[in-house]
Image (cartoon, rainbow, N blue to C red):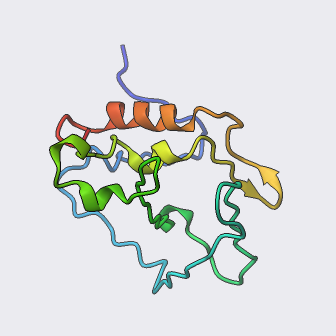
Amino acid sequence: MSTEVNPAYGSSLPMVNAKLDLFKTPPTDISTSSYLMVPIQPFTTGTTPIDFQVDAQGDFVDLNRSDFDVELQLSSTDNNNLARTADDTDTMIAPVNNLSHSIFKQINMRLNRTLISEQTDTYHYKAYMETLLHNNRQRR
């Protein structure tokens, strides 16, 4: 019985999975020489859906390096700022896990006006489940 693995294609060359090659220094990616972080403001404010638009550019847009900055104010029903009254133990407040994910019910992403994300209103549940599955107990 042969233990040799047949390649999928006759001209395919054998290789070693990089994740299993523990004693070799991984190569350095030199395809990107520099990058620029560009802030983009939303079109809308308030309780309406928040829309962002990244216009076409001559450069590559790396969505893996994209992030959100959100400012949040917690207020009581009489519009008092709860952060200022947090010294009292009766008004003690704390954020939930995945605070930024919990704020948004649904996130849609479009490329060239084509929806590429799931059309669901359970975004916050999905984010919480991914946190449970992909992080250790200390990070949860």
Asked if 9 appears above or below 6 in the picture, the reply is below
Which residue appears farthest toward the front when viewing the image? 78
Position of residue 43 in the picture relative to residue 124 (left or right): right
Quarter-wise, where is residue 134 in the image? Answer: top left
The C terminus is located in which quarter?
A: top left
Position of residue 70 in the picture relative to residue 139 (left or right): right
**What's the residue at 36%, 37% (across, down)?**
131
Asked if 57 appears above or below 85 in the picture, the reply is below
**What's the residue at 50%, 62% (across, down)?**
64
| Percent position of residue 124, x then y | 51, 37
Asked if 3 appears above or below 93 in the picture, the reply is above
Give 109 or 18, whichever is nearer the viewer: 109
Quarter-wise, where is residue 81 in the image? Answer: bottom left
| Percent position of residue 78, x then y | 46, 51
**What's the residue at 47%, 42% (across, down)?**
102
Which residue appears farthest toward the right when viewing the image? 113
Position of residue 136 in the picture relative to residue 105 (left or right): left
Asked if 54 appears above or below 90 in the picture, the reply is below
| Percent position of residue 132, x then y | 33, 31
The N terminus is located in which quarter?
A: top left
Position of residue 35 in the picture relative to residue 114 (left or right): left
Give 117 or 39, whichever is nearer the viewer: 39
Give 47 or 98, whichever is nearer the viewer: 47
**Total residue callouts:** 0
